Image (cartoon, rainbow, N blue to C red):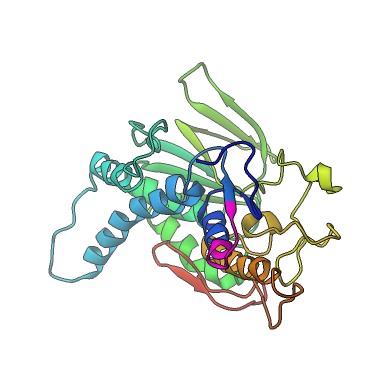
Amino acid sequence: MAEGNDVFDVIVIGAGPVGENAAARVVRGGLTAAVVEERLVGGECNYYACVPSKALLWPMELAAEVDRMPGLGLRGPIEAPAVFDRRDEAVSHFDDGGYVNWLEKLPATKRLIVIGGGPVACEMTQALHALGAVESTVLVREDHLLTRTEPFAGEPAARSLAESGIDLHFGRSLARVERQGTDGPVMVQTDDGSRFEADEILVATGRRLGVHDIGLETVGMRPDGPIEVDASMRATAVPDGRLYAVGDVNGLNLLTHMGKYQARICGDVIAARRSRPPARSGSTSCRSTASEVRTVPAAARAGRGGA
């Protein structure tokens, strides 16, 4: 652990996979680095997002495979407590005391309203429906699912959700949300006056970039959007080239593996500045990449597309 008055070549804000890769890269290049983290080393992907969500999805995918295999006759109800225990096992044994197990002891609700139509909304709707949310309703602002992909990519997901008994409502925006009492049902009213009632509500409408409260104002930047960067991941608004932005904060591609790719570029560029002027040759397109939505059936994307 570093002392408060230590001096380092590089300070990395954020100890998620992207920050870890950036720090490791500059150290490998011969520089010293310190990592500053407000919460948990490992980032949201390990504790709240990718790892726990995929731990919930995997049993559902296996059950779907059994359904498609003729002659097995092994299909039965999924035991939600066992699935949640496996999820907690995946994320709760990193030997980092002081945190709460992801959704610890929270039972699967019977009536669920999901707000959103992106990958998280689709994946979690299917998973929680299979785990006991038998009355699931999805409210989507757009006119189809998975709007960041080609329009046809969301059609199989929509059919699968509907065929499993999940209600889909497109072109709906929230107007009001109200819970009756402290543990009563949740009432949701949309902009067209429709009303929906459920036990719980899951909001899956996107993420806020982590650019607030990190001191961007001190270098003349406003924390009201992505940090614009060049091909070497340097922030273009800071003229002396001392600030770099990788991962979600630059808005190029909000995927963990793409953030790690950017971190490797950034770390190599910073390390190279010791021996030569900063430069980056070649293409660093972070918008054209492969990605997958783990619905049943799954949807994959490669390249830019027309969406």
Q: Residue at x 60, y 59 (%)?
A: 254
Who is closer to the viewer here, 87 or 118? Answer: 87
Q: Residue furthest top?
A: 181
Check the image and report above or below for 303 versus 34. below
Q: Position of residue 300 (x, y in %)?
A: 49, 72
Q: Which residue lies furthest to the bottom in this view?
A: 282
- Residue closer to the observer: 23 or 185: 23
Q: Position of residue 84 (x, y in %)?
A: 30, 42
> Residue 191: within the magenta?
no
Q: In which quarter of the image is residue 287?
A: bottom right
Residue 207: percent from the left, percent from the top?
62, 48
Q: Is 218 positioned to the left or the right of 118 in the image?
A: right
- Seen in the picture, residue 283 relative to 75 is either above or below; the reply is below
Q: Which residue is drawn at 42% across and 36% down?
A: 111
Span shown in magenta: 25-33
In which quadrant of the rendered image does the C terminus lie? bottom right
